[in-house]
Every structure is written in C-alpha cells, then in structure tokens.
Image (cartoon, grey):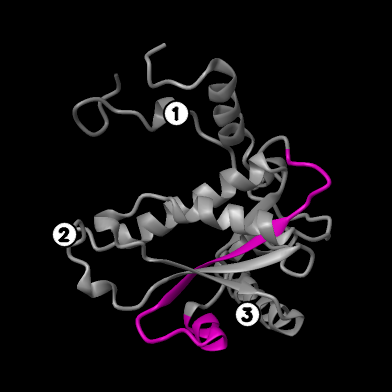
Amino acid sequence: MNDNAYTPAERAAVYRAIGERRDMRHFAGGTIAPELLTRLLHAAHQAPSVGLMQPWRFIRISQRELRGQIQDVVEAERLRTAEALGERSDEFMKLKVEGINDCAEVLVAALMDGRERHIFGRRTLPEMDLASLSCAIQNLWLAARAEGLGMGWVSLFDPQALAALLGLPAGAKPMAVLCLGPVTEFYPSPMLVMEGWAEEKPLSEMLYENHWGVKP
C-alpha cells in the first residue's frame, strides 16, 4: 500500500458502494433530512468537470402537483418508446421505469445554458459537458448508496417538454429525472437483468490493448 492509499476498510467501503449501486425504481416513501440532502448535493458538486465549467444544475421538485406533471411527461415518452420497440413493446410495458410518485425527493439534473462559451476541453469534444454532468450524477448516486438511500435515473422524457414545464432558459437542457429516497431493499443485481430484459457483459469484452478489437 502506498502512502496515499486509504486504509483497507476505507477502500473496501468505496468498492462496496460502487458494486452495490443500483438504478432503483421501487421506493419506500419517507423523507430525507435537509442536511442529508445538502450533503449529497455537495458530493455531486465535487465532481470533476472539463475546464472547471461545472455545467450541472439541479432543480429540486418540492411541489407534489409538479411531480405529477413530470410523471405525465415520462409516461408519454414511455408509450412512444414502447411503440418504437416493436415486437418487444409488450415486454417493455411490463417494466417499472420510474418511481417519481413514490420516492422521497425528485431532482432534475440539467445542463446549464451558455455552454458554447466554454471552449477549454470542448473544442473538439463538445459532449464533455454531458460527461461532466454524468460524473456529478454518479457522485450523488454513490453517496446516496453509502447513506443507505436508493436513486434512480429516469431518461424517458421529451427534453423540450420538460424544459418548458420547468422554465429552463434557451440553451439549457434537462438530462435526468432523479428519484431519491429510502428503499426496502436494494436489488441484488441490476433490475433489467432480474427482469430478463438484458444481460450484463463481462469486462473482457470491453477491454482492448493498443488498437480497437485487439484483446490483451
């Protein structure tokens, strides 16, 4: 162990949070104490970002009526997605894809407006703003798991419809509806695996050496 490494117990806790993180759809209601929610959002805000642009914006949805309207936007896209899936439509419609009305907190994660002004690290890869936001969401996810809270990332929505509903300025874009709160239990494996929708692939299929497609 080098001098900068955490203790074995601390390292184990980090890897445990990573390994047990789940995209949750089933919640147990309840509440999240304000100080805990602030702590989780601070964890998100400590994420790395290209050129230190910090493109993330989080909107806490505290109005129950607005939650319902967001759920309506998600449901509309769920039906459109089912239609686009063709022969898997019926199978898809059996999946639980969100917990908006069941979770303790709903957050909408969005990319800020005016991102075109940030060139550092984005001149050839403008999508690095989304990569930075994704890092913030992952920080929030792992911190939530460590605190015993579940989180689900919902991406089934028309971004223009959600942006209009929440009053986002031109150029800003919602990227995630985040459901956060207590759960009865965490899924032992990803829900889509448990439901037979998809299978996880091993790392060996994603790892190349020196050139694309060349296995180590």
Left or right: 198 in relation to 66: left
CB within 8 Å, label 3 to label 1:
no
Amino acid type, callout 3 = Val
Tell me where the magenta segment starts and ends, as one range.
Answer: 160-187
Left or right: 106 in relation to 123: right
2 or 1: mark nearer the eye: 2
Residue 6 vertical placement versus 72 (above, below): above
Residue appearing at x 69%, y 45% in the figure: 191
Tell which of 18 and 187 is nearer to you. 18
2 or 3: mark nearer the eye: 2
Q: CA distance from mark 3 to mark 1?
A: 35 Å
Amino acid type, callout 1 = Leu
Residue annotated with mark 3: 73
Q: Position of residue 208 (x, y in %)?
A: 29, 28
- Counting residues from the start of the chain, the first of labels 2 and 3 encountered is 3
Q: CA distance from mark 2 to mark 1?
A: 28 Å
Q: Is residue 169 magenta?
A: yes
Residue annotated with mark 1: 203
Q: How many marks?
A: 3
Question: What kind of element bears circle 1?
Answer: helix
- Residue 124, numbered circle: 2
Query: Mark 3: few, some, or many residues within 10 Å (few <14, many ≥20)?
Result: some
Left or right: 158 in relation to 20: left
Q: CA distance from mark 2 to mark 3?
A: 33 Å
Q: Quadrant of the N terminus?
A: top left
CB within 8 Å, label 2 to label 1:
no
Tell which of 125 and 195 is nearer to you. 125
